[in-house]
Image: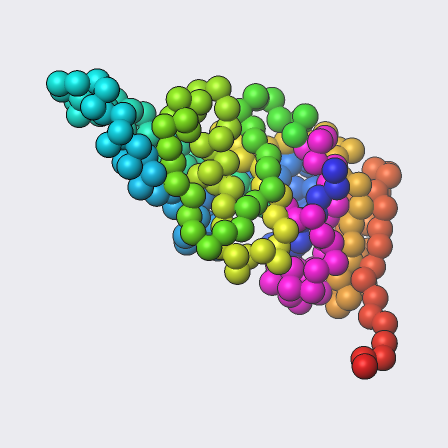
Amino acid sequence: MLVYKYRGIYDSEIFERDLTSIEKNYYWSANFKTLNDPFETILTKEKLLKESKFVLPIFGKGSNEKFQPVMDALDNVLSYTEKIGIYSLSKSYIDELLWAHYANSHNGYCIEYDLDLLLKSYDSDKVYSFPITYKKQPASVDFMDIINSGSSNSLIQKMAGRKSLRWKYEEEIRIVTEDFGEHPYEFDAVKSIYFGLRMKKADRIKVMKRLKGRGINYFEIRKYQSHIN
């Protein structure tokens, strides 16, 4: 599957930083605290608490104490967000808003990756990838999430895989890593680069020179006039 990362050229330092990461074959998996949506990772316990009213009587006397380890386990999983990393990608390379918001209004560029190669490059089985689900309400955790938390990514996906409907235009595919920071990948994971409509010729040449010999395809976004009825 091909996925896309938009990059803006806001100054020479940022341009150099991002170009170096491509040249040296790594991406930066961001800490949740640095993401542009402050409502990330909201996960409600309402469903779990409702289920507990039916489950706890089964355990009889002292059931509240017996239930506490379950809540402790949930809190431990939720605290996992303190160290995990997020690399946000999109299914689209041609979205107008993405070019405006993340590629410096077409002064930047867009990287095309092979998602399978990105995931295979990671040297741990604790890496997850899934499309973001866009809903009006945050996800709610339940007993099955707790039971399966050690053997599946269902809780991770609920925690890191839902955003407000307002973000739906991004068509986000997300990679979640066990820690934030630099994560290397095989050089052939980068397939193409799309230059923005306003990207300077000198910047385009710099990208192609630095990445010469890697078999990367280069494209440019162009504007066409059309009749509007």
Please give the name of the residue rendered at 65% of the width and 30% of the height, measured from the top-left corner: 119
Point out the image quarter for the C terminus: bottom right
Above or below for 28 versus 76: below
Camera-nearest residue between 163 and 175: 163
Residue 180: x, y in percent? Answer: 49, 36
Point out the image quarter for the N terminus: top right
Camera-nearest residue between 31 and 79: 79
Is residue 41 visible in the rendered image? The answer is no
Camera-nearest residue between 3 and 45: 45
Above or below for 222 versus 18: below
Quarter occupied by residue 3: top right
Please give the name of the residue rendered at 36% of the width and 28% of the height, measured from the top-left corner: 143
Please give the name of the residue rendered at 31% of the width and 41% of the height, measured from the top-left corner: 46
Is residue 229 visible in the rendered image? The answer is yes
| Residue 36 within the segment the image draws in magenta | no
In the image as oriented, which residue stretches furthest toward the left?
61
Please give the name of the residue rendered at 34% of the width and 38% of the height, measured from the top-left corner: 47
Which residue range is magenta in the image?
89-118
Residue 18: x, y in percent? Answer: 64, 48
Residue 70: x, y in percent? Answer: 29, 24
For this view, does 187 lie left or right of residue 126?
A: right
For this view, does 174 lie left or right of residue 216?
A: left
